[in-house]
Image: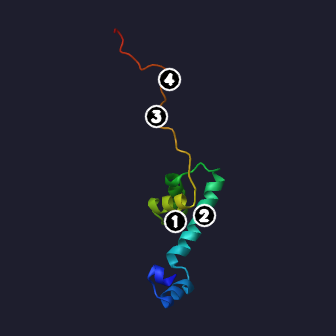
């Protein structure tokens, strides 16, 4: 396997035995909190509103980081409807 990946065996075993980085540990902690908020909202909250909630709690994570963590773990929100929905035909100007 090391020959296929073009890495030395000592490098591979050094990588396997290495503890998780601070960033990986912080991502795991943040993901746990994201899942809690997502379950509490019954799956409604997406990344932008999740970011607002986490910033309100005092977390310092960017919107892109939260969106990436949510997407990689299959967490999605329901989009809000924007504007009014039009029913029927398009409005015509009076007098025509």
Q: Is residue 56 visible?
A: no
Mark nearer the N terminus (4 vs 1): 1
Pick the front one: 34 or 16: 16
Pick the front one: 2 or 12: 2
Q: Is residue 39 above or below residue 27?
A: above
Residue visible at 60% across and 63% down in the picture: 33
Q: Are marks 4 and 3 in contact (CB under 8 Å)?
A: no
Cα gap from disc 2 to disc 1, whole angstroms: 10 Å
Q: Are marks 2 and 1 in contact (CB under 8 Å)?
A: yes
Circle 4 SS class? loop
Label of residue 59 in the image: 1
Mark nearer the N terminus (1 vs 3): 1
Residue visible at 54% across and 57% down in the picture: 53
Cα gap from disc 4 to disc 1, whole angstroms: 43 Å
According to the image, label 4 marks what residue? 87
According to the image, label 3 marks what residue? 83
Circle 2 SS class? helix
According to the image, label 2 marks what residue? 33
């Amino acid at each position: 396997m090391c020959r296929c990946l073009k890495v030395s065996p000592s490098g591979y075993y050094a990588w396997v035995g290495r503890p998780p980085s601070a960033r990986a540990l912080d991502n795991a902690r943040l993901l746990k909190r994201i899942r809690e908020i997502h379950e509490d909202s019954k799956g409604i909250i997406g990344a932008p509103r999740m970011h607002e909630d986490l910033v309100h709690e005092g977390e310092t994570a960017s919107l892109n980081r939260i969106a990436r963590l949510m997407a990689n773990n299959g967490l999605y929100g329901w989009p809000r409807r924007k504007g009014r929905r039009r029913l029927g035909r398009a409005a015509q100007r009076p007098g025509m």
